[in-house]
Image: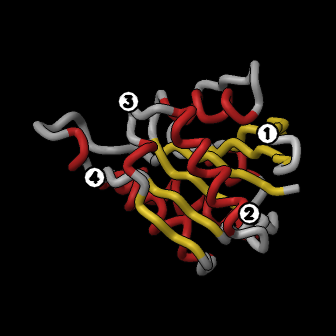
Amino acid sequence: MKTILIMRHGEAEPLVRHDESRALTEKGCQQAKMMGQWLAEQAFSPEGVLISPYLRAQQTANQVLQFNSPRFLETCSDIVPNGNASFAIDYLETLISMHPDIDNWLLVAHMPIVSYLVDQLSPGDMPIFQLAACAQIEYDELTRKGILKGLHIPERVAAFQ
């Protein structure tokens, strides 16, 4: 079994001319950092990471990854807001088969694709993600099926720290 974590970026500044250049706010940085710390405390330290090329997703991943050093890290243009979730999951499954020693994967992306990614892995589950929320999926690479185990949000995990 693998753990796949699908995370939405933290709070970003208001719309700007180029959506891909929106940066995290201070609150967004804190949200991402809280989730990163919580993931590390829960032994969900990501070993394989895919990150949207958009600035706010890159900044979110940087905050999360303060607490561990992944063995595989890649910027992935398939997980942008209007990306194709089916194509992205095919790519993730290829990476999983190429790196069988990696048990915990993290994808940092945006709405609405984060919801579609969860649905591709755990059909029928399509949660609406709050900012910096992280879906936890238990994934069987042999059957290529996953089970949504939880949707964790910064405010809730902060209460347990």
Query: Is tag 1's residue or tag 3's residue first in the polypeptide sequence?
Result: 3
Question: In this figure, which residue is indicated by the disc labeled 3?
Answer: 82
Question: In this figure, which residue is indicated by the disc labeled 2?
Answer: 104
Instruction: Name which quarter of the figure residue 137 lies in.
Output: top right
Residue 115 in view here = yes
- The mark found on residue 59 in the picture is none
Which image quarter is the N terminus in? Answer: bottom right
User: Do the numbered discs 3 and 2 sit on residues whose CB atoms are within 8 Å?
Assistant: no
Question: In this figure, which residue is indicated by the disc labeled 4?
Answer: 23
Q: Tell me the distance, in whole angstroms, between the alpha carbons under discs 1 and 3.
A: 24 Å
Task: Residue at 48%, 27% (x, y): give it.
Answer: 112
Circle 3: residue type: Asn
Pinpoint residue 93: horizontal percent, then vertical percent.
67, 50
Query: Is tag 1's residue or tag 2's residue first in the polypeptide sequence?
Result: 2
Q: What element carries label 3?
A: loop
Query: Is tag 3's residue or tag 2's residue first in the polypeptide sequence?
Result: 3
Circle 4: residue type: Ala
Residue 129 in view here = no
Q: Which of marks 4 and 3 is in front?
A: 3
User: Do the numbered discs 4 and 3 sit on residues whose CB atoms are within 8 Å?
Assistant: no
Task: Residue at 67%, 71% (x, y): give it.
Answer: 47
